[in-house]
Image (cartoon, grey):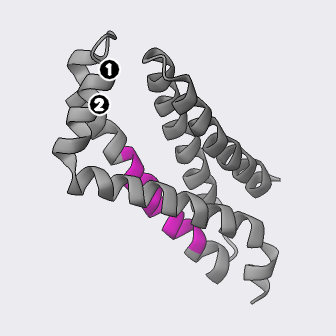
Amino acid sequence: MDNLINNIVSITILAFLLITFLQSGLDKVLDWKGNLSWLKEHFSKTFMGGMVPLLLGVVLVLEIITSIYCILGIYQLISENIIDNAILAMFLSCATLLLLLFGQRVAKDYPGALTITCYFIVAIFGLYVTTI
């Protein structure tokens, strides 16, 4: 119980990121065609237009890996007070969100980029809290 209380902020942020990336990854798996169609249109006028299937696959893999590390991070913080996987989960979250932000900026979807920025603030705060 002490580990839970001592790491409650990190665990809560990891849970937030887990929900975010697991849901997003599952949505891509369950509706690949719909996501691909929307993203092809979204990036049609950019240099990334022809790479959408590859980039969607990369983002999907990153989201699933990030979700796994969030689960491992939560488990290890509670059970053993080990922060390694929590830090990796937070960093992967930040890296994935930066890639998504880059895509939104390239597509000139500034409201979408702002939304990603809100998630990034949570992730970078989680990285900070976990490493201090």
Residue type pointed to by label 1: Phe
Quadrant location of residue 107?
Answer: top left
Quadrant location of residue 9?
Answer: bottom right
The secondary element bearing badge 2 is classed as: helix
- In this rendering, position of residue 12 left or right of residue 65: right
Whether residue 88 appears in magenta in the rendering, the answer is no
| Percent coordinates x, y for residue 64 in the rendering | 37, 55
Residue type pointed to by label 2: Leu
- In this rendering, position of residue 25 left or right of residue 116: left
For this rendering, which residue is in front, 25 or 2? 25
Q: Is residue 93 above or below residue 23?
A: above
Residue under the image location 61 percent in, 32 percent down: 114
- In this rendering, position of residue 75 left or right of residue 21: right
Residue at which label 1 appears: 43
What span is colored magenta in the figure? 62-74
Residue under the image location 83 percent in, 53 percent down: 132
Residue 87, label in figure? none
Q: The N terminus appears in which quarter of the rendering?
A: bottom right
The secondary element bearing badge 1 is classed as: loop
Residue under the image location 75 percent in, 73 percent down: 8
**Discs 2, 1 touching: Cβ within 8 Å:** yes
